[in-house]
Image: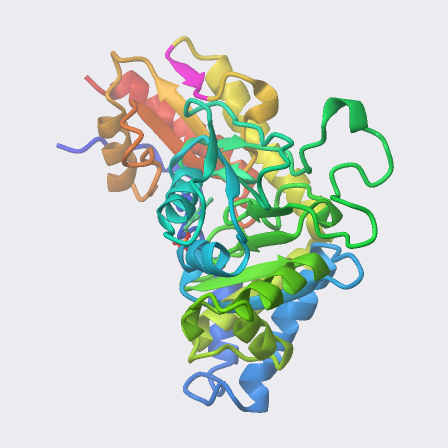
Protein backbone atom coordinates (compact mmCIF):
# COMPACT_ATOMS: atom_id res chain seq x y z
CA UNK A 1 0.00 0.00 0.00
CA UNK A 2 1.61 3.30 -1.04
CA UNK A 3 1.63 6.02 1.57
CA UNK A 4 -0.62 8.99 0.84
CA UNK A 5 1.01 12.30 1.75
CA UNK A 6 -1.57 14.84 3.04
CA UNK A 7 -2.46 17.15 0.16
CA UNK A 8 -1.76 20.31 2.14
CA UNK A 9 1.88 19.27 2.50
CA UNK A 10 2.45 18.58 -1.19
CA UNK A 11 4.06 21.07 -3.59
CA UNK A 12 1.69 22.79 -6.02
CA UNK A 13 3.92 21.53 -8.85
CA UNK A 14 5.79 18.30 -8.22
CA UNK A 15 8.49 18.55 -10.88
CA UNK A 16 11.99 18.75 -9.40
CA UNK A 17 13.98 17.07 -12.15
CA UNK A 18 17.54 18.17 -12.87
CA UNK A 19 16.93 17.96 -16.60
CA UNK A 20 14.53 17.73 -18.26
CA UNK A 21 13.20 20.15 -15.70
CA UNK A 22 9.86 21.74 -14.91
CA UNK A 23 8.25 23.53 -17.86
CA UNK A 24 6.06 26.43 -16.74
CA UNK A 25 2.40 26.25 -17.80
CA UNK A 26 2.80 29.64 -19.52
CA UNK A 27 5.44 28.09 -21.78
CA UNK A 28 2.99 25.40 -22.80
CA UNK A 29 0.48 28.17 -23.48
CA UNK A 30 3.12 29.86 -25.66
CA UNK A 31 3.16 26.68 -27.75
CA UNK A 32 -0.58 27.01 -28.26
CA UNK A 33 -0.22 30.71 -29.05
CA UNK A 34 2.48 29.88 -31.62
CA UNK A 35 0.56 27.00 -33.15
CA UNK A 36 0.84 28.63 -36.58
CA UNK A 37 4.66 28.44 -36.43
CA UNK A 38 4.74 24.74 -35.59
CA UNK A 39 5.11 22.71 -38.75
CA UNK A 40 6.63 25.54 -40.80
CA UNK A 41 10.06 25.98 -42.38
CA UNK A 42 13.04 26.85 -40.22
CA UNK A 43 14.44 28.82 -43.19
CA UNK A 44 11.50 31.27 -43.20
CA UNK A 45 10.97 34.42 -41.10
CA UNK A 46 8.58 33.08 -38.42
CA UNK A 47 10.99 30.39 -37.15
CA UNK A 48 14.06 32.55 -37.81
CA UNK A 49 12.39 35.18 -35.66
CA UNK A 50 12.24 32.69 -32.77
CA UNK A 51 15.98 32.05 -33.15
CA UNK A 52 16.61 35.79 -33.27
CA UNK A 53 14.59 36.28 -30.06
CA UNK A 54 16.60 33.52 -28.37
CA UNK A 55 19.96 34.95 -29.47
CA UNK A 56 19.19 38.55 -28.54
CA UNK A 57 17.39 37.54 -25.35
CA UNK A 58 20.34 35.43 -24.19
CA UNK A 59 22.74 38.26 -25.06
CA UNK A 60 20.77 40.54 -22.74
CA UNK A 61 20.21 37.96 -20.01
CA UNK A 62 23.87 36.90 -19.85
CA UNK A 63 25.29 40.42 -20.39
CA UNK A 64 27.41 39.46 -23.40
CA UNK A 65 30.66 41.43 -23.60
CA UNK A 66 31.32 43.32 -26.86
CA UNK A 67 32.18 41.02 -29.71
CA UNK A 68 30.80 37.86 -28.08
CA UNK A 69 28.21 35.88 -30.07
CA UNK A 70 25.53 33.27 -29.40
CA UNK A 71 25.76 30.15 -31.59
CA UNK A 72 23.45 27.15 -31.55
CA UNK A 73 22.98 23.79 -33.19
CA UNK A 74 21.45 20.37 -32.81
CA UNK A 75 22.73 17.59 -30.57
CA UNK A 76 22.69 19.00 -27.04
CA UNK A 77 25.69 19.63 -24.81
CA UNK A 78 26.95 16.11 -25.51
CA UNK A 79 27.41 17.06 -29.17
CA UNK A 80 29.22 20.19 -28.07
CA UNK A 81 31.91 18.09 -26.35
CA UNK A 82 32.78 16.62 -29.76
CA UNK A 83 32.53 20.04 -31.43
CA UNK A 84 34.93 21.51 -28.86
CA UNK A 85 37.29 18.56 -29.17
CA UNK A 86 37.45 19.00 -32.93
CA UNK A 87 37.24 22.77 -33.34
CA UNK A 88 38.63 24.34 -30.16
CA UNK A 89 41.39 22.14 -28.74
CA UNK A 90 44.50 22.73 -30.82
CA UNK A 91 46.98 20.41 -29.13
CA UNK A 92 46.09 19.66 -25.52
CA UNK A 93 43.27 20.36 -23.08
CA UNK A 94 43.17 20.61 -19.32
CA UNK A 95 39.98 19.46 -17.61
CA UNK A 96 38.54 19.92 -14.15
CA UNK A 97 36.74 16.66 -13.45
CA UNK A 98 34.54 16.32 -10.37
CA UNK A 99 31.55 14.36 -11.58
CA UNK A 100 30.09 12.54 -14.56
CA UNK A 101 29.68 15.46 -16.95
CA UNK A 102 33.13 16.96 -16.53
CA UNK A 103 34.57 13.44 -16.84
CA UNK A 104 32.74 12.81 -20.10
CA UNK A 105 34.26 15.84 -21.82
CA UNK A 106 37.69 14.84 -20.47
CA UNK A 107 37.18 11.41 -22.01
CA UNK A 108 36.23 12.95 -25.35
CA UNK A 109 39.46 14.95 -25.68
CA UNK A 110 41.56 12.15 -24.18
CA UNK A 111 40.41 9.75 -26.87
CA UNK A 112 40.94 12.12 -29.79
CA UNK A 113 43.80 10.64 -31.83
CA UNK A 114 44.94 14.07 -33.08
CA UNK A 115 45.41 15.53 -29.56
CA UNK A 116 48.02 14.97 -26.89
CA UNK A 117 46.78 13.20 -23.75
CA UNK A 118 44.59 15.57 -21.78
CA UNK A 119 45.64 16.86 -18.39
CA UNK A 120 42.82 15.94 -16.00
CA UNK A 121 42.59 17.51 -12.56
CA UNK A 122 40.29 15.29 -10.55
CA UNK A 123 38.43 15.78 -7.30
CA UNK A 124 36.08 13.47 -5.42
CA UNK A 125 32.34 13.76 -6.17
CA UNK A 126 30.87 16.29 -3.77
CA UNK A 127 33.91 18.56 -4.03
CA UNK A 128 35.24 20.81 -6.81
CA UNK A 129 38.41 20.39 -8.88
CA UNK A 130 40.03 23.69 -9.82
CA UNK A 131 41.81 24.43 -13.10
CA UNK A 132 45.49 25.30 -12.88
CA UNK A 133 47.72 27.69 -14.78
CA UNK A 134 49.71 25.85 -17.45
CA UNK A 135 51.86 26.77 -20.43
CA UNK A 136 51.24 23.36 -21.89
CA UNK A 137 47.51 23.47 -22.67
CA UNK A 138 45.41 25.53 -25.08
CA UNK A 139 41.97 24.85 -23.59
CA UNK A 140 40.86 24.88 -19.95
CA UNK A 141 37.56 23.06 -19.46
CA UNK A 142 35.35 22.96 -16.40
CA UNK A 143 31.70 22.49 -15.55
CA UNK A 144 30.04 25.54 -14.03
CA UNK A 145 27.62 23.28 -12.19
CA UNK A 146 28.23 19.53 -11.92
CA UNK A 147 24.65 18.30 -12.24
CA UNK A 148 25.60 14.76 -11.24
CA UNK A 149 26.85 15.75 -7.77
CA UNK A 150 25.36 19.17 -6.99
CA UNK A 151 28.72 20.98 -6.77
CA UNK A 152 29.25 24.37 -8.43
CA UNK A 153 32.48 26.10 -9.39
CA UNK A 154 33.22 29.79 -9.81
CA UNK A 155 33.97 30.77 -13.43
CA UNK A 156 37.39 32.38 -13.71
CA UNK A 157 40.61 31.93 -15.62
CA UNK A 158 43.27 30.13 -13.63
CA UNK A 159 45.92 32.68 -12.79
CA UNK A 160 49.41 32.03 -11.41
CA UNK A 161 49.51 33.29 -7.87
CA UNK A 162 52.21 35.87 -8.62
CA UNK A 163 50.28 37.28 -11.57
CA UNK A 164 46.96 37.52 -9.75
CA UNK A 165 45.69 41.07 -9.92
CA UNK A 166 48.03 42.11 -12.73
CA UNK A 167 46.22 43.52 -15.76
CA UNK A 168 45.38 40.87 -18.33
CA UNK A 169 46.54 38.09 -16.04
CA UNK A 170 45.83 34.66 -17.44
CA UNK A 171 44.96 36.13 -20.80
CA UNK A 172 47.95 34.79 -22.68
CA UNK A 173 50.45 36.96 -24.49
CA UNK A 174 49.30 40.55 -24.90
CA UNK A 175 48.44 41.66 -28.42
CA UNK A 176 47.60 38.33 -30.01
CA UNK A 177 45.24 37.81 -27.10
CA UNK A 178 44.76 34.13 -27.79
CA UNK A 179 46.05 32.26 -24.78
CA UNK A 180 44.33 29.11 -23.53
CA UNK A 181 40.57 29.32 -24.02
CA UNK A 182 38.34 28.84 -20.98
CA UNK A 183 35.53 26.52 -22.10
CA UNK A 184 32.75 26.20 -19.53
CA UNK A 185 30.05 23.53 -19.45
CA UNK A 186 27.22 25.67 -18.14
CA UNK A 187 24.47 23.24 -19.15
CA UNK A 188 22.71 23.38 -15.80
CA UNK A 189 24.10 26.69 -14.54
CA UNK A 190 23.62 29.16 -17.39
CA UNK A 191 20.83 31.60 -16.60
CA UNK A 192 20.76 30.98 -12.84
CA UNK A 193 24.36 31.08 -11.61
CA UNK A 194 26.32 34.34 -11.51
CA UNK A 195 28.91 34.69 -14.26
CA UNK A 196 31.11 37.32 -15.87
CA UNK A 197 31.33 36.09 -19.43
CA UNK A 198 34.42 38.22 -20.06
CA UNK A 199 36.22 35.55 -18.00
CA UNK A 200 35.16 32.86 -20.50
CA UNK A 201 35.74 32.08 -24.15
CA UNK A 202 33.02 29.50 -24.54
CA UNK A 203 30.02 29.21 -22.22
CA UNK A 204 27.82 26.41 -23.50
CA UNK A 205 24.53 24.94 -22.35
CA UNK A 206 21.30 23.25 -23.40
CA UNK A 207 17.65 24.28 -23.07
CA UNK A 208 16.33 21.55 -20.75
CA UNK A 209 17.67 22.81 -17.42
CA UNK A 210 17.40 26.50 -16.41
CA UNK A 211 15.60 27.27 -19.67
CA UNK A 212 12.81 24.81 -18.97
CA UNK A 213 12.47 23.68 -22.59
CA UNK A 214 13.03 20.33 -24.26
CA UNK A 215 16.49 18.94 -24.92
CA UNK A 216 18.22 18.46 -28.24
CA UNK A 217 19.92 21.81 -28.86
CA UNK A 218 23.26 23.17 -27.77
CA UNK A 219 23.85 26.89 -27.29
CA UNK A 220 27.24 28.52 -26.84
CA UNK A 221 28.40 32.05 -26.10
CA UNK A 222 31.68 32.49 -28.00
CA UNK A 223 34.42 35.08 -27.49
CA UNK A 224 36.25 36.54 -30.49
CA UNK A 225 39.26 34.40 -29.49
CA UNK A 226 37.12 31.26 -29.59
CA UNK A 227 35.79 32.17 -33.03
CA UNK A 228 39.34 32.81 -34.26
CA UNK A 229 40.56 29.51 -32.79
CA UNK A 230 37.83 27.52 -34.53
CA UNK A 231 38.47 29.27 -37.84
CA UNK A 232 42.17 28.52 -37.62
CA UNK A 233 41.80 24.86 -36.63
CA UNK A 234 39.09 24.16 -39.18
CA UNK A 235 41.20 25.58 -42.02
CA UNK A 236 44.34 23.78 -40.83
CA UNK A 237 43.61 20.52 -42.58
CA UNK A 238 42.10 18.69 -39.58
CA UNK A 239 39.07 16.74 -40.76
CA UNK A 240 35.94 18.17 -39.14
CA UNK A 241 32.57 16.62 -40.06
CA UNK A 242 30.17 19.34 -41.16
CA UNK A 243 27.72 18.47 -38.38
CA UNK A 244 30.44 19.15 -35.81
CA UNK A 245 31.89 22.30 -37.37
CA UNK A 246 31.71 25.29 -35.04
CA UNK A 247 32.32 27.79 -37.84
CA UNK A 248 29.47 26.28 -39.87
CA UNK A 249 27.19 26.43 -36.82
CA UNK A 250 28.19 30.05 -36.26
CA UNK A 251 27.50 31.00 -39.88
CA UNK A 252 24.02 29.52 -39.59
CA UNK A 253 23.44 31.13 -36.19
CA UNK A 254 24.35 34.56 -37.56
CA UNK A 255 21.53 34.02 -40.06
CA UNK A 256 19.20 32.96 -37.19
CA UNK A 257 19.18 29.39 -38.44
CA UNK A 258 20.67 26.02 -37.60
CA UNK A 259 22.65 23.76 -39.94
CA UNK A 260 19.85 21.19 -40.01
CA UNK A 261 16.24 21.12 -38.89
CA UNK A 262 15.71 22.07 -35.23
CA UNK A 263 12.74 21.10 -33.06
CA UNK A 264 10.56 24.17 -33.53
CA UNK A 265 8.58 23.54 -30.33
CA UNK A 266 11.83 23.64 -28.34
CA UNK A 267 12.60 27.04 -29.82
CA UNK A 268 9.18 28.33 -28.72
CA UNK A 269 9.61 27.03 -25.16
CA UNK A 270 13.14 28.40 -24.96
CA UNK A 271 12.30 31.87 -26.32
CA UNK A 272 9.43 32.14 -23.85
CA UNK A 273 11.62 31.18 -20.89
CA UNK A 274 14.41 33.60 -21.83
CA UNK A 275 11.90 36.45 -22.11
CA UNK A 276 10.19 35.42 -18.87
CA UNK A 277 13.51 35.51 -17.03
CA UNK A 278 14.22 38.97 -18.45
CA UNK A 279 10.76 40.21 -17.45
CA UNK A 280 11.24 38.96 -13.88
CA UNK A 281 14.46 40.92 -13.49
CA UNK A 282 17.05 39.04 -15.51
CA UNK A 283 20.04 37.07 -14.31
CA UNK A 284 20.21 38.73 -10.89
CA UNK A 285 16.62 37.76 -10.22
CA UNK A 286 17.15 34.19 -11.39
CA UNK A 287 20.30 33.80 -9.29
CA UNK A 288 18.45 35.02 -6.18
CA UNK A 289 15.40 32.88 -6.85
CA UNK A 290 17.42 29.66 -7.11
CA UNK A 291 19.54 30.69 -4.13
CA UNK A 292 16.36 31.17 -2.08
CA UNK A 293 15.25 27.63 -2.94
CA UNK A 294 18.71 26.29 -2.11
CA UNK A 295 18.73 28.05 1.25
CA UNK A 296 15.43 26.35 2.10
CA UNK A 297 16.71 22.92 1.06
CA UNK A 298 20.14 23.00 2.69
CA UNK A 299 19.01 24.60 5.96
CA UNK A 300 16.25 21.99 6.19
CA UNK A 301 18.79 19.18 5.78
CA UNK A 302 21.18 20.72 8.29
CA UNK A 303 18.40 20.86 10.85
CA UNK A 304 17.70 17.10 10.52
CA UNK A 305 19.73 14.38 12.24
CA UNK A 306 19.06 12.08 9.30
CA UNK A 307 19.80 14.38 6.34
CA UNK A 308 23.10 15.99 5.29
CA UNK A 309 24.05 18.15 2.32
CA UNK A 310 26.32 15.93 0.19
CA UNK A 311 28.63 18.83 -0.71
CA UNK A 312 30.53 19.59 2.49
CA UNK A 313 31.77 23.10 1.64
CA UNK A 314 28.79 25.50 1.70
CA UNK A 315 30.48 27.69 -0.96
CA UNK A 316 30.55 24.73 -3.36
CA UNK A 317 26.92 23.72 -2.76
CA UNK A 318 24.99 24.26 -5.96
CA UNK A 319 22.12 26.69 -5.82
CA UNK A 320 20.46 25.03 -8.83
CA UNK A 321 20.84 21.29 -8.13
CA UNK A 322 20.82 20.28 -4.46
CA UNK A 323 22.00 16.88 -3.25
CA UNK A 324 21.02 15.61 0.20
CA UNK A 325 22.35 12.36 1.66
CA UNK A 326 19.98 10.44 3.91
CA UNK A 327 20.97 8.35 6.91
CA UNK A 328 21.36 4.65 5.96
CA UNK A 329 18.36 3.85 8.20
CA UNK A 330 16.14 5.66 5.67
CA UNK A 331 15.95 4.13 2.22
CA UNK A 332 16.20 7.02 -0.23
CA UNK A 333 14.84 4.78 -3.01
CA UNK A 334 11.67 4.26 -0.94
CA UNK A 335 11.41 8.00 -0.27
CA UNK A 336 11.81 8.76 -3.98
CA UNK A 337 9.21 6.10 -4.85
CA UNK A 338 6.72 7.41 -2.28
CA UNK A 339 7.15 10.93 -3.58
CA UNK A 340 6.63 9.70 -7.14
CA UNK A 341 3.41 7.91 -6.14
CA UNK A 342 2.23 11.23 -4.74
CA UNK A 343 3.07 13.16 -7.90
CA UNK A 344 6.44 14.55 -6.78
CA UNK A 345 8.92 13.50 -9.43
CA UNK A 346 12.54 12.99 -10.32
CA UNK A 347 14.34 13.57 -7.02
CA UNK A 348 16.48 10.45 -7.52
CA UNK A 349 20.26 10.85 -7.36
CA UNK A 350 22.43 10.65 -10.48
CA UNK A 351 22.37 7.01 -11.47
CA UNK A 352 26.09 6.34 -11.41
CA UNK A 353 26.72 8.15 -8.13
CA UNK A 354 25.06 5.29 -6.26
CA UNK A 355 24.34 7.18 -3.04
CA UNK A 356 21.45 7.06 -0.56
CA UNK A 357 20.49 10.50 -1.72
CA UNK A 358 17.85 12.93 -2.94
CA UNK A 359 18.71 15.33 -5.76
CA UNK A 360 16.51 18.38 -6.26
CA UNK A 361 16.41 20.64 -9.32
CA UNK A 362 15.93 24.23 -8.10
CA UNK A 363 15.97 26.07 -11.41
CA UNK A 364 14.18 29.44 -11.57
CA UNK A 365 10.96 27.89 -12.92
CA UNK A 366 10.61 26.07 -9.58
CA UNK A 367 8.78 27.98 -6.83
CA UNK A 368 10.81 28.26 -3.60
CA UNK A 369 7.54 27.52 -1.74
CA UNK A 370 7.38 24.22 -3.59
CA UNK A 371 10.89 23.35 -2.39
CA UNK A 372 9.68 24.06 1.15
CA UNK A 373 6.65 21.82 0.53
CA UNK A 374 8.95 19.09 -0.77
CA UNK A 375 10.94 19.19 2.47
CA UNK A 376 7.71 18.97 4.52
CA UNK A 377 6.66 16.00 2.42
CA UNK A 378 9.99 14.25 3.05
CA UNK A 379 9.62 14.92 6.80
CA UNK A 380 6.19 13.32 6.66
CA UNK A 381 7.51 10.30 4.77
CA UNK A 382 10.37 9.92 7.25
CA UNK A 383 7.77 9.75 10.01
CA UNK A 384 5.55 7.25 8.24
CA UNK A 385 7.91 4.97 6.31
CA UNK A 386 8.44 1.75 8.23
C1 LIG B 1 22.57 17.72 -18.66
C2 LIG B 1 24.02 18.02 -18.77
C3 LIG B 1 24.77 17.65 -19.90
C4 LIG B 1 24.20 16.84 -21.02
O1 LIG B 1 23.32 17.60 -21.77
P1 LIG B 1 22.63 16.98 -23.08
O2 LIG B 1 21.94 18.15 -23.70
O3 LIG B 1 21.72 15.90 -22.61
O4 LIG B 1 23.71 16.44 -23.95
C5 LIG B 1 26.10 18.03 -19.95
N1 LIG B 1 26.68 18.72 -18.95
C6 LIG B 1 26.00 19.07 -17.84
C7 LIG B 1 26.68 19.84 -16.77
C8 LIG B 1 24.65 18.74 -17.72
O5 LIG B 1 23.95 19.10 -16.64
Q: Out of 101 and 358, give the one closest to the viewer.
A: 101
Residue farthest top in this picture: 305
Q: Out of 298 and 90, give the one closest to the viewer.
A: 90
Residue 159 is situated, as x and y percent measured from the top left of the image, at 72, 31
In the rendered structure, does residue 309 fall within the stretch colored magenta?
yes
Whether residue 77 is situated above or below residue 5 in the rendered picture: below
Residue 112 is situated, as x and y percent measured from the top left of the image, at 38, 51
Q: Give the extent of the magenta segment.
A: 306-310
Q: In which quarter of the image is residue 251?
A: bottom right
Q: Out of 107 and 375, give the one closest to the viewer.
A: 107
Residue shown at 75% from the left, 55% from the top: 63
Residue 248 is situated, as x and y percent measured from the top left of the image, at 53, 75
Whether residue 51 is situated above or below residue 297 in the rendered picture: below
Q: In this view, does 75 lie to the left or right of 314?
A: left
Q: In this view, does 332 lie to the left or right of 180?
A: left
Residue 154 visible: yes
Residue farthest right in this picture: 167
Residue shown at 42% from the left, 80% from the top: 261
In the rendered structure, does residue 101 fall within the stretch colored magenta?
no
Residue 165 is situated, as x and y percent measured from the top left of the image, at 84, 30
Residue shown at 26% from the left, 20% from the top: 384
Residue 4 visible: no
Which image quadrant: the N terminus? top left
Q: How many marks?
A: 0
Amino acid sequence: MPLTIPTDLLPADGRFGSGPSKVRPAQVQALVDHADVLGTSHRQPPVKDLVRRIRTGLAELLHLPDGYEVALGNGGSTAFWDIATLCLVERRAQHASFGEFGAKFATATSRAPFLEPSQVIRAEPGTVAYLEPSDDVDVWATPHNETSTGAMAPVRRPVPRAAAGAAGAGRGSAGTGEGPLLVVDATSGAGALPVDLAETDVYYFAPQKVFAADGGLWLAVLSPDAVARAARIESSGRWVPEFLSLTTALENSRADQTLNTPAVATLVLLADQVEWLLAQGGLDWAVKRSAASAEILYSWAEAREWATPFVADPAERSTVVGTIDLDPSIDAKAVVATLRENGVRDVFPYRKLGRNQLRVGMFPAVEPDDVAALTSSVDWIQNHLR
